[in-house]
């Protein structure tokens, strides 16, 4: 752990999960002693076959699933028992799997709700919304359209904007290219590249193994809810084919 | 049949319909945002009406000044019911929730009868009891006041839901509760306030009903049917559409009333309800359901 | 039995039915024979009561048996299918009014009116079913509740049915009150056994599994090929038939019916309570629930008027108030009723 990242309030804190065991009411143990470190200013990728617990891992990070045991730390501080709203306030923001806009609200309303936590700070609130329209100029002319009427690519941009609007310190992104037409997938990876270049701390879960590993700094794989492999990107690129074959056999 | 009769009936229908919009909005809000079928809705209406009767006729207090206390009390009651009952059932299936609300219906109806007996009540409205003459038609001032207040409240609610951030949050909550909590909205707290507001609106409906009609604590099912009809006609789309649906029901009722005896107007409205159910609701999947 | 169509399910429908069946089997932790034996014992103990017990007790037991019939019918769609009917009084009332009208206008005896009473309720149920069973369950629930009030209004305004005053229903005048008590006890007794057997057969048939599949996940059941609307309609109609038959017997038993009594939410509440307390979706539930609810009401009726609260005498409505509270408590905490306390879910006890 570097001294810089350990300091609370740092712009690039690290997020560390240690020996997390978690599950759902109907499905007791989905994650079994999983440990993951999201390094500051880096892109950490989590891979794994369907149902291996990747989304659940993200829910533990964002506070929607309380782990049965293990610890979650942000910049060295224990946040295991903090709820989702508190974690959002601490700077952990999540872009969930699948469509997550409010379909019958306008694009602008969707973004404004993204800034819900700072609503009392009028100035910051207004600036945050404006900043997102600056960042995603294609959304400007769509501001008053219902989000549900947008194309898949446009809706994804609304989701990115909503996730970024509070300038989060850690970004959790779950399968961002799933369900999009192939032409739009490139747009998503361009956006991810931009986020990486900006030096953000990112945890990316993806089924698109090649593309994800290409932008990763560090890679973890999960299998059956357990840590399987992990290592820096360079070590992984050679093994990709083997990995995918292995998953197909799982 | 002369034209004056029809104009008069139309005017009566609009005034009545304004009240019907008020009767339905609480049901619509709770169903639309929280997906809770509040079958105790009409008991709340009648309970509030009786309370209003007690304050105005019983204690001789001012009829306009007493609206707010009744509604505020209902809001507090709604907070309690959500905390103690609705919230506990948030993850349960529809039928369990309805059983609990049926229990609530029985409890409140019993209490109402214990306090106020089963007598039919009419609120004596003092200075509001005048009749306004407008050319060929004459309308009681109370009906005008009740309809105007209701229209004001529903239009106000419409702007609240569509123009404020909290309104967006409420609509967002109904469309996607998971994402609502993801952006940091305290879903439980917001739900509780929406629920309490729904109960308060039901009480408001009860007050405007009491201003305009005689009512009986055991016949509130009629008002449930009416509110339900308005919700089905107007959909769960918006406060404005609820208001319009209320006006339509009111006008139909008075127009039909010209041609057939009073007690059979029920049959016509129930017929419309059955047809509306068949034609307009979203079916099993709920795919077409529009939410506030 | 309305299982005809379900005897040849499609392959996907088989999956849905098997899943529902599996959920039944895994929730059973006491031996299979216990429930039928318990029911048999209850009926065997009851059998001599009509002749042996005092008239007061016979009357109470007859009321219990009446509830068993109606509640078994209600439980088919309400308990197994998850479609709550808050208008049980509509079916009971239709049967009662059909019987009373036939007796009043044509002097029909009680035996002859049972079938017409059942048919009247069936006709009403088909109308309700067609209007609401294509929709989600809460439409059905609200509709049944407000229809009770419509039925009340219609009957009140129909002179042939006695209007607001009601109708007298006369049993053969040669019988004394003891004999009449016995007559209706054994009539209800026979019908209660019939209703219980019907419920038992349904629970263990494809029809019953289809209802459970609907209750658990209706869209999924539909996708898998369960003809959900027809299954629900058949459950409603079968339940209505039982309610209507019970209603016609009830009209003769009480001797006088009037609209507010016949179409009251009180009957609906009692029936819902019987099933909820006994256990929704279990054929033994209504049998046990009827004893509990009627017993409870008797106790409340006897004890409450004696109590006083800070110098006020408790009004009669306290009775219903308490029943309403009990319903809320069961909905919140004891969802599967008394029977549910006996059956434990397996597969939930995985160590943490
Ligand atoms: N809300 C839930 N309730 C119960 N089980 C769940 C829930 N969400 C996911 N699961 C189960 O947890 C396991 C892991 O799911 P998930 O974390 O979504 O995996 P992944 O994202 O890797 O595909 C799966 O077996 C899935 O069925
Ligand atoms: Mg996933």
Image: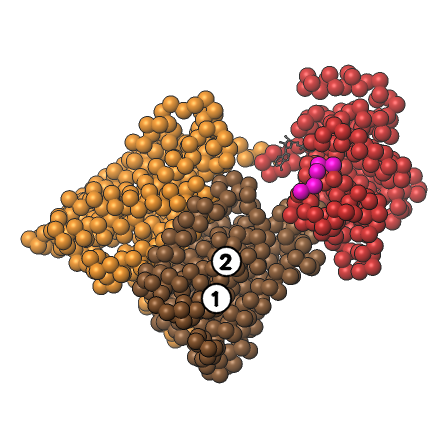
Chain colours: A red, B brown, C orange
Extreme residue in the front direction: B2
Extreme residue in the left direction: C174
On the image, the x and y values in percent for residue B196 come to 57, 61
Q: Is residue C35 above or below residue B118?
A: above
Magenta residues, as a range? A149-153
Q: Which residue is drawn at the image coordinates 32% and 62% (left, top)?
A: B260
User: Which quadrant of the rendered structure holds the N terminus of chain C?
Assistant: top left
On the image, the x and y values in percent for residue A145 come to 70, 47
On the image, the x and y values in percent for residue A184 come to 76, 32
Q: CA distance from mark 2 to mark 1?
A: 11 Å
The residue carrying mark 2 is B245
Magenta highlight on residue C350: no
Magenta highlight on residue A150: yes
The residue carrying mark 1 is B14
**Mark toward the start of the polypeptide (2 vs 1):** 1
Q: Is mark 2 within 8 Å of ligand 1?
A: no
Q: What secondary structure characterizes most of the magenta part? A: helix
Residue C233 falls left or right of residue A84: left
Contact, CB < 8 Å: mark 2 with mark 1? no
Q: Regarding ligand 1, which quadrant of the image does it lie in?
A: top right
**Label 1 marks which chain's residue?**
B
On the image, the x and y values in percent for residue C21 come to 44, 29
User: Which quadrant of the rendered structure holds the C terminus of chain C?
Assistant: top right
Extreme residue in the right direction: A3
Q: Is residue C296 above or below residue B141?
A: above
Instruction: Work out whether residue A202 or residue C135 is closer to the camera in this orientation and state it.
Output: C135
């Amino acid at each position: 752990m570097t001294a810089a990242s350990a300091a609370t309030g740092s712009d690039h804190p690290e997020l560390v999960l240690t020996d997390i065991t978690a599950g759902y009411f109907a499905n007791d143990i989905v994650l079994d002693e999983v440990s993951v470190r999201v390094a500051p200013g880096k892109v950490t990728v989590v891979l794994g076959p369907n149902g291996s617990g990747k989304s659940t891992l993200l829910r533990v990070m964002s506070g929607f699933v309380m782990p049965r045991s293990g610890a979650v730390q942000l910049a060295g501080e224990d946040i295991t028992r903090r709820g989702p709203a508190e974690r959002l306030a601490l700077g952990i923001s999540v872009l969930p799997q699948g469509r997550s806009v409010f379909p019958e609200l306008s694009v602008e309303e969707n973004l404004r709700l993204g800034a819900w936590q700072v609503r009392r700070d009028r100035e910051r609130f207004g600036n945050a919304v404006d900043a997102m329209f600056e960042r995603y100029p294609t959304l400007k002319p769509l501001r008053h359209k219902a989000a549900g009427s947008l194309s898949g690519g446009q809706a994804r941009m609304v989701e990115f904007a909503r996730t970024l609007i509070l300038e989060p310190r850690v970004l959790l992104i779950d399968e961002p290219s799933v369900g999009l037409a192939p032409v739009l997938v490139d747009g998503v990876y361009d956006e991810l590249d931009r986020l990486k270049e900006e030096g953000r701390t990112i945890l990316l879960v993806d089924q698109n193994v090649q593309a994800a590993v290409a932008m990763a700094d560090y890679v973890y794989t999960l299998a059956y809810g357990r840590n399987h492999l992990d290592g820096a990107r360079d070590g992984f690129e050679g093994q990709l084919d083997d990995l995918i074959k292995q998953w197909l056999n799982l | 049949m002369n034209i004056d009769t029809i104009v008069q009936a139309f005017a009566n229908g609009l005034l009545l319909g304004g009240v019907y919009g008020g009767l339905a909005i609480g049901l619509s809000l709770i169903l639309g945002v929280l997906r809770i079928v509040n079958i105790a809705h009409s008991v709340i209406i009648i309970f509030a009406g009786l309370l209003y009767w007690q304050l105005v006729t019983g204690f001789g207090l001012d009829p306009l000044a007493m609206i707010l206390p009744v509604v505020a009390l209902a809001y507090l009651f709604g907070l309690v019911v959500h905390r103690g009952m609705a919230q506990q059932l948030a993850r349960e299936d529809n039928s369990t929730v309805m059983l609990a609300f049926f229990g609530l219906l029985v409890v409140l109806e019993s209490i109402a009868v214990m306090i106020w007996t089963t007598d039919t009540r009419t609120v004596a409205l003092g200075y509001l009891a005048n009749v306004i003459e407008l050319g060929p038609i004459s309308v009681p001032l109370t009906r005008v006041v009740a309809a105007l207040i209701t229209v004001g409240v529903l239009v106000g609610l419409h702007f609240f839901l569509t123009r404020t951030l909290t309104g967006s949050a409420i609509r967002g909550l109904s469309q996607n509760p998971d994402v609502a909590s993801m952006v940091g909205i305290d879903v439980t707290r917001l739900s509780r306030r929406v629920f309490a507001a729904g109960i308060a609106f039901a009480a408001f409906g009860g007050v405007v009903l009491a201003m305009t009609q005689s009512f009986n604590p055991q016949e509130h099912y009629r008002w449930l049917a009416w509110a339900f009809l308005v919700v089905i006609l107007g959909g769960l789309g918006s406060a404005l559409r609820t208001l319009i649906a209320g006006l339509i029901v009111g006008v139909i009722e008075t127009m039909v009333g010209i041609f057939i005896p009073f007690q059979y107007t029920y049959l016509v409205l129930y017929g419309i309800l059955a047809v509306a159910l068949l034609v307009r609701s979203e079916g099993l999947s709920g795919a077409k359901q529009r939410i506030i | 039995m309305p299982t005809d169509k379900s005897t040849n399910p499609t392959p996907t429908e088989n999956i849905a039915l098997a899943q529902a069946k599996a959920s039944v089997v895994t929730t059973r932790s006491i031996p299979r024979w216990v429930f039928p034996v318990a029911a048999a014992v209850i009926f065997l103990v009851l059998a001599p009561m009509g002749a042996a017990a005092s008239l007061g007790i016979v009357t109470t037991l007859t009321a219990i048996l009446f509830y068993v019939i109606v509640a078994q019918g209600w439980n088919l769609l309400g308990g197994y299918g998850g479609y709550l009917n808050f208008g049980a009084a509509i079916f009971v009332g239709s049967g009662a009014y059909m019987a009373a009208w036939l007796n009043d206008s044509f002097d029909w005896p009680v035996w002859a009116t049972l079938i017409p009473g059942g048919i009247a309720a069936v006709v009403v149920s088909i109308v309700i079913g067609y209007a609401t069973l294509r929709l989600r369950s809460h439409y059905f629930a609200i509709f049944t509740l407000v229809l009770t009030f419509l039925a009340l209004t219609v009957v009140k305004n129909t002179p042939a049915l006695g209007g607001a005053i009601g109708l007298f229903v006369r049993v053969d005048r040669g019988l004394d009150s003891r004999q009449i008590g016995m007559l209706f006890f054994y009539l209800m007794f026979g019908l209660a056994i019939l209703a219980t057997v019907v419920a038992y057969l349904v629970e263990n048939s494809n029809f019953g599994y289809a209802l459970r599949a609907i209750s658990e996940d209706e869209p999924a059941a539909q996708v898998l090929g369960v003809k959900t609307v027809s299954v629900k309609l058949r459950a409603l109609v079968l339940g209505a038939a039982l309610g209507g038959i019970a209603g016609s017997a009830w009209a003769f038993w009480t001797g006088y019916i009037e609209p507010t009594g016949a179409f009251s939410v009180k009957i609906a509440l009692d029936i819902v309570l019987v099933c909820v307390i006994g256990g929704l979706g279990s054929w033994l539930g209504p049998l046990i629930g009827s004893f509990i609810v009627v017993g409870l009401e008797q106790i409340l009726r006897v004890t409450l008027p004696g109590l006083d609260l800070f110098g006020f005498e408790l009004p009669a409505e306290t009775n219903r108030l308490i029943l309403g509270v009990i319903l809320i408590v069961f909905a919140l905490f004891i969802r599967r009723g008394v029977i549910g306390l006996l059956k434990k879910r397996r597969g939930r006890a995985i160590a943490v």
